[in-house]
Image (cartoon, rainbow, N blue to C red):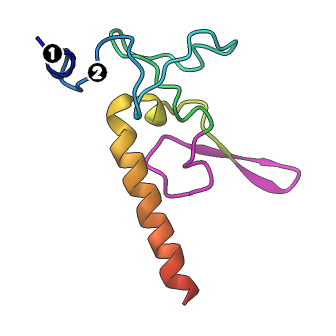
């Protein structure tokens, strides 16, 4: 069987267990790994280690806010949204929509 056929049948996402791809990267050598607890059988996607949604109040993840020195600070300790492989497309769509909105508002 050709390699691409093996990959296609590996699992629902098209990725063999332990295989990195454009939408999934797991860095077990990181000194902070694992930074979030994940359900059994779910890999920890490190692709968005520094979440690209942090600057958005309307991000789809779990967030809370604290006050420090008169400043409101977003806290994402309980959020694992960017660490699920299946959320890759949702994150990209969110960022594209936010960018398009920003560009429309600049005109």
Find disc 2 in the rendering and name its residue. Answer: 15
Near mark 1 (Cα within 10 A), the count class, few <14, some 14-19 or many ≥20, is few
Q: Could you tell whether 75 is left or right of 81 in the image?
A: right
Residues at marks 1 and 2 touching, judged by CB atoms closer than 8 Å: no
The local secondary structure at tag 1 comes to: loop
Extreme residue in the left direction: 1
Extreme residue in the front direction: 2
Q: Residue at x 48, y 30 (%)?
A: 80
The number of numbered badges drawn on the structure is: 2
Find disc 1 in the rendering and name its residue. Answer: 2
Residue 81: x %, y % from top left: 44, 35
Residue 59: x %, y % from top left: 48, 52
- Say which label, 1 or 2, has the lower sequence index: 1
88 is higher (above) or lower (below) than 45: below
Near mark 2 (Cα within 10 A), the count class, few <14, some 14-19 or many ≥20, is some
The local secondary structure at tag 2 comes to: loop
Extreme residue in the right direction: 69
Q: Quadrant of the N terminus?
A: top left
Q: Quadrant of the C terminus?
A: bottom right
Magenta segment boundaries in residue numbering? 51-73
The magenta stretch spans residue 58: yes
The magenta stretch spans residue 88: no
Q: Residue at x 42, y 21 (%)?
A: 20
**Residue depth check, mark 1 versus mark 2: number of the one nearer the observer:** 1
């Amino acid at each position: 069987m050709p390699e691409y056929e093996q990959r296609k049948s590996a699992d629902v996402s098209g990725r063999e267990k332990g295989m990195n791809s454009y939408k999934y990267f797991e860095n077990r050598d990181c000194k902070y790994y694992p930074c979030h607890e994940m359900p059994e059988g779910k890999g920890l996607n490190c692709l968005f280690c520094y979440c690209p949604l942090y600057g958005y109040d309307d991000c789809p993840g779990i967030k809370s806010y604290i006050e420090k020195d008169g400043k409101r600070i977003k806290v994402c300790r309980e959020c694992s949204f960017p660490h699920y492989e299946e959320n890759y497309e949702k994150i990209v769509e969110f960022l594209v929509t936010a960018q398009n909105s920003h560009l429309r508002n600049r005109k």
